[in-house]
Amino acid sequence: INAEYMGQYKRATQIQTVGALLGSSELGSKYISETNDYFLSKGHLAAKSDFMLGAQEYATFLYVNAAPQWQTFNGANWNTMENNVRSYAANNRVELEIYTGTQGITTLPNVNNVETELYLYADGSKYIPVPKIFWKIVYNANTKAAVVFVGVNNPYIANPGSDYNVCTDICSKISWISWKATDQVKGYSYCCEYADFKNSVADAPSLSVNSLLT
């Protein structure tokens, strides 16, 4: 099963799958590129670089820890944010708890210009949905401070609607984040207060939070 799952991350397979979902092989080739970063990569929820031991790093590659993520976003704003979090922990000499997840299923217009949900596997049945957003809660359990980082997982959406904006952006209060939050290709991104985010994403973990992690 894992080998079949990994095969879905091949660009040629993605071109066929997206084309089938959207009703046009031309659209498959339009949205999935064979040469640049417009393709779906294996987005790690818990980042490999967050771990020190080889066995822990290896575990991040397992199916349960991955979701389809556009490489334009994965290698840009999402990667920048993860590096910023590690730098914050090192510079402030604090231990942080990290919780990462996804929400919704992203869409692209099909041959009839109808927004259509994307899946990595679609052969009769549909499996492995492509998330609308990725989110990461960064939590200091000692001070009960937290911040939530959210990124839009679709480089083709020029103006993400309310379904992509699940909480009010407070990135202006987070001086240590250096991503290009309004860059469509790098991935529209924003920061949230934990309580605001939790109100919209019910399956996010329940934490005791008293303040913003700044």
Image (spheres, rainbow, N blue to C red):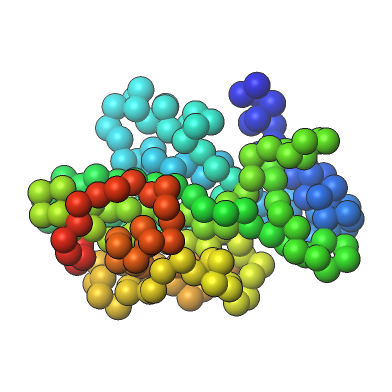
Front position in the image: 112 or 9: 112
6 with respect to 204 (left or right): right
Can residue 90 be seen in this snapshot? Answer: no
Please name the residue shown 53% across and 31% down the image: 63
Image position, residue 94 (x, y; %): 13, 49
Can residue 157 be seen in this snapshot? Answer: yes
Vertical order, 140 against 121 (above or below)? below
Front position in the image: 200 or 174: 200
Image position, residue 40 (x, y; %): 63, 48
160 with respect to 174 (left or right): right
Vertical order, 45 against 153 (above or below)? above
Image position, residue 166 (x, y; %): 46, 66
* Quadrant, the N terminus: top right
- The image shows a total of numbered marks equal to 0
Image position, residue 65 (x, y; %): 47, 35
Please name the residue shown 38% across and 49% down the image: 204
101 with respect to 87 (left or right): right
43 with respect to 156 (left or right): left
Please name the residue shown 41% across and 69% down the image: 167
The quarter of the picture where residue 127 lies is: top right
Front position in the image: 151 or 195: 195
* Quadrant, the C terminus: bottom left
Please name the residue shown 62% across and 53% down the image: 105
Front position in the image: 48 or 24: 24
